[in-house]
Image (cartoon, rainbow, N blue to C red):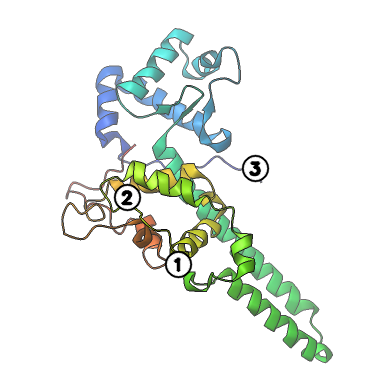
Amino acid sequence: MKDAYYFKHDSNARNDIKIKRLIKVYGLEGYGKYWILVEILREQDGYRLSLNSTKYPYAEVADELRCTEKEAKHFINDCIKEFHLLETDGQYLWSNSLLRRMAMWDEFREKQAQKAHKRWSKNKSNATAMPRQSRGNASIVKESKVKERKETLTSSEFHSEDLNLRYSNCPHQQIIELYHKILPELPKIMEWTPQRQAFLRARWKESKNRQNLAWWQLFFEKVKKSDFLMGRVKEFRADLEWLIRPKNFPKVLEGRYDNRQSEGGKCTEW
């Protein structure tokens, strides 16, 4: 079945301060236009709209927004420069919030697919197994467990030469540079030890969605918003090694260290 182009839309997104500013200027019509833009971005490869794919990129968007090309371009520019709801580098248009949400959704879908594949493989193996093959099956099970263990190795076990070669495509230097650029308030990396390399390689290879620098940029931007991780509420400050440790990393992704919301209810930023 074809991807239904799902994305998470908070029921109180209208309460985001940036959305409120948009509504104040453009009214509910502008609110509707903004969500049409988000839907368009969701349909693109990588969730980014190319501005160079055609000679008149805004003309196609204008058709969707039911306005003129000039009005569409003006509205998008306001979403970028005035309301800070969208981003552009001149070649692509995107929403950081959508990228962050889709990264989490894609990772969830990948994990579910892996679980389903394991169940299917296990059922298939059980269905074709014969009693007289018990000794051979024991060998297969042992080999399967070894393979599974390799897939779930803890960071301290990532020191064998073959695994280092297999995951050597992890761009350590670029990720460290992103960390320093986005989080200059946190401790700088002075030495990239083998253990730290192992931690980062493990986090990189755990999900295909993490195997691009855009994902790590969004991850560090999430960290930057946390008063706890940034040391704004206590003496503790996270560093890159702490963030990518196997016990801490999933907690950061799950929002365990996000700032507490007011009693009025959580309003996720768009």
- Which quadrant would the C terminus be assigned to in this image? top left
Residue 65 left/right relative to 266: right
Q: Label 1 to label 3, Cα distance in Å?
A: 42 Å
Query: Residue 234 location in percent, x, y?
Result: 16, 58
- The tag earlier along the polypeptide, 1 or 3, is 3
The residue to which callout 1 is attached is 195
Q: Label 3 to label 2, Cα distance in Å?
A: 34 Å
Front position among marks 1 and 2: 1
Q: Decide if residue 68 is in sight here.
A: no
Q: Nearer the viewer, residue 6 or 174?
A: 174
Which image quarter: residue 127?
Answer: bottom right
Q: Amino acid at mark 2?
A: Val
Front position among marks 3 and 2: 2
Q: Nearer the viewer, residue 31 or 44?
A: 44
Which image quarter: residue 80?
Answer: top left
Front position among marks 1 and 3: 1
Residue 190 left/right relative to 2: left
- Considering every residue shown, the one lying at the far right of the view is 132
The residue to which callout 3 is attached is 2
Query: Residue 219 location in percent, x, y?
Result: 40, 48
Q: Amino acid at mark 3?
A: Lys
Q: Decide if residue 258 is in sight here.
A: yes
The residue to which callout 2 is attached is 223
